[in-house]
Image: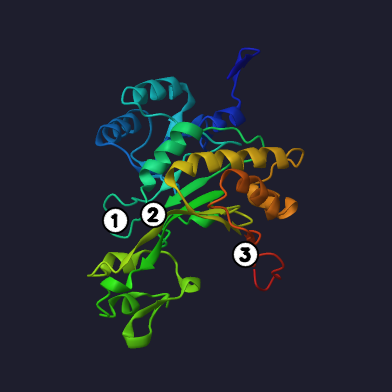
């Protein structure tokens, strides 16, 4: 805010970049809070409720990306809101052309489908990379612990999905048929003498066969993240493309850093543009070549470009409208 001829001028763009978003009401703002992975302590939750009641309205808004937003906050109360939230370590999030707060499912802590510790990954990314400037547009990251993919990893700029590559040990097999009967993808089928045959091309790497095998004939050969790049939603949606498989958890932050670096370089002079659009213009091979140097055991040899989603809105005639 600046003073001009006795009047206070509010820089809405800078405020929004700092997590303070102008509302319709005069002098009122929504304050977006930083909640990596959607996980919050009871202590923070209680404090947020008190601050919202004191400075805002009768409720808060839960955003689609797991943030809590304080609504109807007068700009004159910004300092007080920030200071009181800081008493419990709660910070305001950010908007603008930078890496946003990562979203994540519950991971493997208590979800029986979970394969990877998505909560830990989200915290690490938030700690190491939150607010990193892209110079071009927003940059969103999401973590799914298993192929159910509740956070919809492929519509993030970079998304991660937990994956397990199973391997079968015939010596332990009871030929009970549980694995082939339970595999919803047809990746395990009965073969000779009812012994299972693994069809890798059908596998989603959910790890269900490993979990349910009573004889431990199926075990984990590889475990890590499938990585998608170039996704986004909004006015012109795009589904990201698979760029790496079985990426170890300790390489999550490094690969995001490398993708961010490529994005910053390649999008230079292209204006306000998301990662997926840069991939379409520069070619997916450009990014894969960059990543293979550092992540040779995970990055795919080839992949397709991100997929643009036709929302079927353009071209409607007046009768259809």
Near-viewer residue (243 or 175)? 175
Q: What residue is pinned by disc 2?
A: 145
Asked if residue 320 is positioned above or below residue 133 in the image, the reply reads below
Q: Helix, strand, or loop for circle 3?
A: loop
Is 108 left, or right, of 263 in this rendering? left
The reply to whether dot 2 and dot 1 touch (C-beta < 8 Å) is yes
Front residue of 310 and 114: 114
Residue 200 % position (x, y): 47, 71
Q: Nearer the viewer, residue 97 or 58?
A: 97
Name the outermost residue toward the right: 269
How many numbered discs? 3
Q: Secondary structure at mark 2?
A: loop
315 in relation to 1, above or below: below
Q: Position of residue 250 (x, y in %)?
A: 44, 42
- Residue at image coords 48%, 43%: 252
Name the residue furthest left: 214
- Quadrant housing residue 34: top left
Residue 280 seen anywhere in this rendered image of the structure: yes
The residue that disc 3 covers is: 311
Q: Is residue 52 above or below residue 118?
A: above
Point 72% across, 67% down: residue: 315
Disc number placed over residue 111 in the picture, else none = 1
């Amino acid at each position: 805010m600046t003073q001009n001829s006795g009047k206070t001028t509010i820089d809405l763009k800078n405020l929004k970049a700092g997590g303070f978003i102008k509302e319709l009401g005069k002098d009122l703002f929504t304050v977006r809070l930083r909640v990596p992975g959607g996980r919050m302590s009871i202590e923070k939750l209680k404090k947020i409720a008190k601050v919202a009641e004191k400075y805002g309205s009768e409720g808060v808004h839960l955003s689609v990306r797991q943030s809590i937003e304080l609504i109807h906050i007068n700009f004159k109360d910004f300092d007080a809101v920030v200071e009181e939230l800081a008493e419990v370590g709660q910070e305001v999030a950010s908007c603008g052309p930078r890496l946003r707060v990562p979203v994540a499912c519950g991971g493997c802590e208590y979800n029986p489908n979970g394969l990877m510790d998505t909560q830990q990954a989200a915290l690490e990314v938030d700690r190491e990379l939150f607010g990193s400037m892209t110079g071009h547009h927003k940059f969103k990251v999401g973590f799914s612990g298993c192929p159910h993919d509740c956070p919809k990893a492929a519509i993030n700029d970079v998304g991660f999905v937990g994956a397990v590559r199973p391997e079968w040990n015939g010596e332990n097999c009871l030929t009970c048929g549980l694995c082939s009967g339970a595999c919803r993808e047809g990746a395990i089928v009965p073969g000779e003498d009812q012994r299972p045959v693994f069809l890798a091309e059908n596998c989603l790497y959910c790890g269900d066969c490993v979990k349910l095998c009573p004889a431990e004939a199926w075990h984990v050969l590889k475990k890590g993240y499938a990585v998608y790049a170039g996704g986004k939603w909004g006015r012109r949606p795009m589904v990201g493309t698979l760029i790496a498989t079985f990426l170890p958890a300790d390489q999550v932050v490094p690969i995001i850093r490398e993708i961010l670096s490529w994005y910053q370089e390649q999008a230079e002079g292209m204006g306000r543009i998301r990662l997926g659009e840069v991939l379409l213009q520069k070619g997916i091979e450009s990014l894969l070549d960059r990543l293979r140097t550092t992540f040779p055991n995970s990055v795919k040899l080839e992949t397709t470009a991100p997929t643009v989603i036709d929302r079927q809105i353009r071209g409607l005639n007046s009768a259809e409208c």
